[in-house]
Amino acid sequence: MLYILCLYILIGIVALLVAGWRILTRRMPNMKGKHVVITGGSSGLGIALAKEAFNNGAAHVTLIARKQEQLEAASAKIPHKEDQAIHIISADVTNVESLQNAFNQIKDLGLKIDYLFPNAGYARPGEFDQLPIEEFKNLMNVNGIGAILSTRMAYTLLNEGAHITFSGSICSLLTFSGYAAYGPSKFALKGFADTIRNEFSHKSIHVHMGIYSSMDSPGFAIENKYKPTACAAIEGTANLFSPETIAKYVYWGINRNDYFIYTEILTFFIINVSYGIAPSNNIFADLFFAPFVPIIRYFTVKYIDGLAGLPNENKPKND
């Protein structure tokens, strides 16, 4: 028993050392001469990823979004040097023909892709029986199918050593009351990322799954208009991050070739409780917390089930 306890303490010490090393060795990737493609590039995280890409030396950034005027406004907010170029392409990620045309334009520019961010997405919370039926389809099409199609269309343009980073959320691992339409779309996204990570494991294509916390963005403000009371209460346990902060974590994670990219300790616990078969960022931390996983899972279920019974004081509003 003493031997097991000593081994457990040793694992904990090593886990702390690894965690400390990961923090101390945070580095941005050298993106000099690279090309970055971002769907959902006209707002929020898309703009932040573009800014950080140029800060890291990227030569080209291509923003893809539906509305041309929003793309033009976004591009004006992204500073870059004379030897750096920003390209904007209007396309709908749920439309095969539109998306194919977008990537054909990239090909016509003579560009390959080094960093792909299938980032287009949105959230529409609501109680299951109150959500418009079309939202179930729309959310799956944009958040799930849109990312899959973007990856498929980009595939032949990917350079050797390219990185694909998906914009997931806590709901890619743990979903709850209020996210009956949004949660499944983010679960589907992680399922796709897990699949191609394995399929590409013998190719020089790196796949990353972002598990992002709540983000202070225009989309989040719209989302809160519809968020049921129980959903807001459960989600309130997580921190709110700026798109710029999350973008920095994304590039740090890419540079370390982490599979899961996240911003806070709460997400680490959720990953350990529910991530399934996927690469670990810190195997020693996983081992140290393993005995607590059933306990965390038990009390998490009790907690979210308790909050799910809160009466909804934020009734749906007309769009």
Image (cartoon, helix red, strand yellow):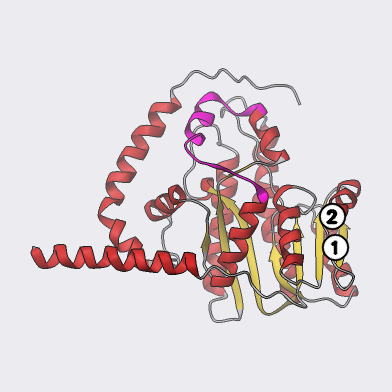
Q: Residue at x 58, y 65 (%)?
A: 252
Describe the element under mark 2 as helix, strand or loop.
Answer: loop
In front of the other: 298 or 25: 25
Q: Is residue 240 above or below residue 247?
A: above
Looking at the image, which residue sits at the far front? Answer: 24
Q: Is residue 231 magenta?
A: yes
The reply to whether residue 280 is visible in this rendering is no
Task: Say how many tags the image has.
Answer: 2
The reply to whether residue 225 is visible in this rendering is yes
Which of marks 1 and 2 precedes in the sequence?
A: 2
Circle 2: residue type: Ala
Q: At which x and y percent is residue 98?
A: 85, 57
Q: Is residue 180 above or below residue 156?
A: above
Q: Residue at x 43, y 23 (%)?
A: 309
Name the side, left or right, on which 79 lies relative to 298.
right
Whole-number angstrom distance, CA of label 2 to CA of label 1: 6 Å
Q: At which x and y percent is residue 88?
A: 87, 59
Q: At which x and y percent is residue 127?
A: 56, 27
The answer to whether marks 2 and 1 mark residues whose Cβ atoms lie closer than 8 Å is: yes
Q: Which residue is mark 2?
A: 91
Describe the element under mark 1 as helix, strand or loop.
Answer: helix
In front of the other: 101 or 265: 265
Q: Residues within 10 Å of mark 1 (few under 14, many from 20)?
A: many
Residue span colored magenta: 225-243
Q: Is residue 198 above or below residue 275?
A: below
Q: Quadrant of residue 282?
A: bottom left
Q: Quadrant of residue 251?
A: bottom right
Q: Residue at x 56, y 29 (%)?
A: 128
Q: Is residue 103 above or below residue 42?
A: below
**Quarter of the image that includes the C terminus:** top right
Q: Which residue is mark 1?
A: 102
